[in-house]
Image (cartoon, rainbow, N blue to C red):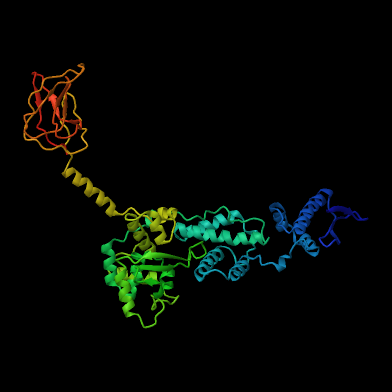
Amino acid sequence: MASIGKDSNGTKQILFYAADGKRETIRLGKATQRQAEAVCLRVEKLVTAKLTGHSPDDETSRWLSDIDDGLRQKLVKVGLAVSRDDRSDSLATFIDSYIAMRTEVKPRTRDLYEQTRRSLLQFFNADRQLSAITPGDADAWLLFLKEQGLAQNTIRRRCGRAKQLLKAAVRQKLVSENPFADLKANVIGNESRFYFVTQDEAQLVLSACPDAEWRLIFALSRYGGLRCPSEHLALRWSDVNWEHGRILVSSPKTEHLESGESRLIPMFAELRPHLELAFEQAAPGSEFVISRYRDGGQNLRSQLNRIICRAGLKPWPKTFQNLRSTRETELAEQFPLHVVCKWIGNSTPVAAKHYLQVASEHFERAASVSKKALQNPVQQPLECTGNAAQIVNTAHEKTPESSGVFESLPVISTEQSSPTWTRTNCQKVLNWQRVTTFRGTHLARNPARSMRGTLLCGCWSMNGRHCLTPLSPPF
């Protein structure tokens, strides 16, 4: 391990054995014993990390980033550090090298990295050293993004990519800590940007589309739930199974996930006519379903917004996203949610947080049901005031109608061991009936059906007579 040595002139030096067994010396010059001990401790940790092939601990990495160039150069000579001149630790240089290194990412992901790069360089100088960026600077950058009027989730995504960039710098030992680590990067649901595209609105947009292929682009999102443009442009005619009414959708966004490279969806009835028309108009030997709008420079969202305006509607937020969201909301009312998520290509938590909506037609449907219930109310038993008992109907089946009124029945005290039986004056055979009042219980017999214990409405009048209602179903 490392030790402290002293020259004849009183200067201090650190002595240690390198990984190749060679003895190395770091001359500190005129330093106090305490200073020499602090450097010796860090040198020991750097030597251990180099021997074991691990990264130095955070405290040692931070110390290595903060030391002056003279001491750092001495560490470079003995192989314990890398020269700052040889490192890409300016912000612009590092980001450019990182993006160039990520050759496996898709073009859309590369574009998102470029967006984050522009946002960072607009606030920080391009020559800003990575080690000079503090958590306070990261907070100031967050406020800068908010002042630009960006949506909350857009800001969170850029914070997430900034965290990713600086995390790579930490792993390369260019900085000791990630200044963006505390910024929130998780995307949250924003109900204010939900919009349910009704069937009537969808038909207006379809009518305003310039050609069959544009109608198919809209229908694939609104009725098929595809992601636009990635899944639209990846769809081939060979993926369409006309016989079984199914479509194989390739998903570039989720292909890195297990079983996420594709999914099978039904050929929904609303979607099939647009597919058939596009197939009839497709050139012989066409491979892709969408062939005229494959140029990466075309912005399908802007074009769709213009089509929506021509339809006499106001463009809604998240134009294509809300088409998928609307479709998943519709399907969730007809099929189990796990089936719908399989068709749409997301998970149940994601669907609940970012896709499923509460539409105005849900309120209208609920209100119409309530109105119908009020127009056809359930007949309630008669309620008696004062000392009269409230009669409750416990029947589980509809009681046959009767054309007569029960004859006056004697009061049977509830204290008697057994009730008294009598018949009604109705010629139709009825169920066993029990009439309960505050004075006792009356039973009327009908032997045609098994005893159900059906209750009749009734009350006891104070003049000594029973007032019974005609036997009629309460519902």
Q: Residue furthest right?
A: 8
Residue located 62% across and 61% down the image: 168
72 with respect to 380 (left or right): right
Q: Where is residue 59 in the image (x, y as percent from the top left)?
A: 70, 52
Image height of 240 relative to 351, above or below: below
Image height of 273 relative to 404, above or below: below
Q: Residue furthest bottom?
A: 284
Q: Where is residue 474 in the image (x, y as percent from the top left)?
A: 16, 36
Residue located 58% across and 71% down the image: 103
Instruction: Compare residues 4 and 358 and report the one nearer the observer.
Output: 358
241 with respect to 125 (left or right): left
Q: Position of residue 326 (x, y in %)?
A: 34, 59
In which quadrant of the rendered image does the C terminus lie? top left
Image height of 52 relative to 450, above or below: below
Visible in this render: residue 381? Answer: yes
Instruction: Compare residues 281 and 165 and report the one nearer the observer.
Output: 281
Q: Where is residue 346 in the image (x, y as percent from the top left)?
A: 43, 59
Q: In which quarter of the image is residue 286?
A: bottom left
Visible in this render: residue 210? Answer: no
460 with respect to 178 (left or right): left
Q: In which quarter of the image is residue 222?
A: bottom left
453 with respect to 31 (left or right): left
Q: In which quarter of the image is residue 467?
A: top left
Image height of 297 relative to 87, above or below: below
